[in-house]
Image (cartoon, grey):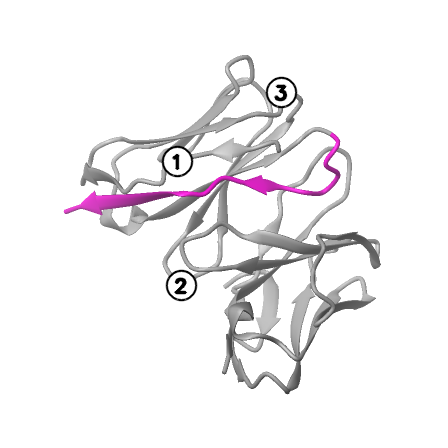
Amino acid sequence: DTEVTQTPKHLVMGMTNKKSLKCEQHMGHRAMYWYKQKAKKPPELMFVYSYEKLSINESVPSRFSPECPNSSLLNLHLHALQPEDSALYLCASSSVSQGFQPQHFGDGTRLSIL
Amino acid sequence: QKEVEQNSGPLSVPEGAIASLNCTYSDRGSQSFFWYRQYSGKSPELIMSIYSNGDKEDGRFTAQLNKASQYVSLLIRDSQPSDSATYLCAVNQNNAGNMLTFGGGTRLMVKP
């Protein structure tokens, strides 16, 4: 079990659906991340939140909309996705104390777009 | 583009042998280095962090960092079939804030 919890574990949705992925951590971390990972590829950074503010958006299409309601929660709202968006979506968190701190990943949400 | 490079493998070793995984990086100013293990269909799991030149040991794992040569390696002693996974090298490049750059990963197969 990881200390970063993601729900749901699996999600199948049509291209016209709206859904949300959720991530929660209780480690007191103030940086949270969304990654997308395709098979046999490394994780690809999508968004970074630092102190609940969006600090990095890696040119992600607007059909992905992140939200950080508080320091423990991170959401990723999905709308009008394409089949190529099918992937493992990973949430991670890290401390932002002195020096660079490692990121800890949740178990991921496996997303399939029909 | 600043890069992190790994041999994709598969690296095949017999059970009980030492597995040696290597990673090179292009940004000389990089300060922090991490090894993640990822089983098929699962999420990456942090197994080692290293910040200064030399060796860092944790159980059967040893991370080695050589900033002058810009490489970081992971040694797994007494390899077990359960070590079979993809190992991702990740680097926090200089002035990259909270961002990590991942290598493509090396697939390790430990044969009984």
Dot 3 and dot 1 residues touching (CB under 8 Å): no
Instruction: Kindly state the secondary structure of the residue where label 1 is placed.
Output: loop
Mark found first going from the N terminus, 2 or 1: 2
Residue B61 spot, x, y in % from top left = 39, 34
* Residue that badge 1 annotates: B59
Q: Nearer the viewer, mark 3 or mark 1?
A: 3
Residue that numbered label 3 is attached to: B28
Distance Cα–Cα, label 3 vs label 1: 29 Å
- Please report the bounds of the magenta region as a residue range: B95-112
Chain hosting mark 2: B
How many numbered marks appear? Answer: 3
Question: In what element is the residue under mark 3?
Answer: loop
Q: Does A88 sit above or below residue B18?
A: below
Q: Is residue B26 above or below residue B15?
A: above
Quadrant of residue B28 within the rendered picture: top right
Three-letter residue code for mark 3: Arg
Q: Secondary structure at mark 2?
A: loop
Residue linked to disc 2: B41
Disc 1 is attached to a residue of which chain? Answer: B
Of mark 2 and mark 3, the one earlier in the sequence is: 3
